[in-house]
Image (cartoon, rainbow, N blue to C red):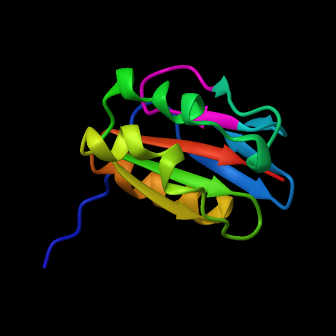
Amino acid sequence: MKFHLSAPTGNVFTGYGPDHVEVNRERFEVNILVFPDRPVTAWAPAGFAALSREDFAALLELKPEIVLLGTGRSIRFPHPRLTADLTAARIGVDVMDFQAACRTYNVLAAEGRLVVAALILA
C-alpha cells in the first residue's frame, strides 16, 4: 500500500482550544463559516439558541456537498426545520462538537470535497 500526502489548498484549521479556532494560523474567537476557497466569515453571532432557518439557507447558494455544524464544546442538535432547505437540496448536515468539526473539515478539504464548517464556539 502506498500512502500519499494530501494537503488541502485554501483554508485549513491549524489549531483550536476550548474557546477559539485557528484558520491558516489566524485566531478566531467568534462563530464562523469556513470554506476551502473563500474568506472566513462571521456567522450566527447570537449563538446556538438563536439559530434560524435563514442562517442555514444562506449556505444554499454555495452548494456544498456537506455542512459540518460544530455546536460548541458539546453536541447540540438543531431542530430539523432549521436545516430543511439544505436537506431538500440534498446537502448533508453533520452535527458534532466544534473541535471534531475542525478535524473532519481538514480531512474532507484535503480530499477536495466541497465542505463548509459552520462553527459555534460557545
Q: Where is residue 80 in the image (x, y as percent from the top left)?
A: 49, 55
Q: Where is residue 120 in the image (x, y as percent from the top left)?
A: 72, 48
Above or below: residue 53 compared with residue 92:
above
- Write the residue at 73% across / 70% down: 74
- Write the residue at 28% across / 51% down: 111
- Image quarter in which the N terminus is found: bottom left
Asked whether residue 104 appears in the rendered view, the answer is yes
Residue 24 on the magenta segment: no
Q: Where is residue 116 in the image (x, y as percent from the top left)?
A: 46, 40
Residue 9 position by quadrant: top left
Residue interval drawn in magenta: 32-40
Q: Is the magenta stretch mostly helix, strand or loop?
A: loop
> Is 106 left, or right, of 63 in this rendering?
right
- Write the residue at 36% across / 20% down: 61
Q: Nearer the viewer, residue 70 or 23?
A: 70
Q: Where is residue 13 in the image (x, y as percent from the top left)?
A: 60, 47
> Is 5 left, or right, of 42 in this rendering?
left
Q: Which of 88 and 1 is in front in this view?
A: 88
Above or below: residue 104 compared with residue 56:
below
Asked whether residue 24 appears in the rendered view, the answer is no
- Write the residue at 48% across / 21% down: 38
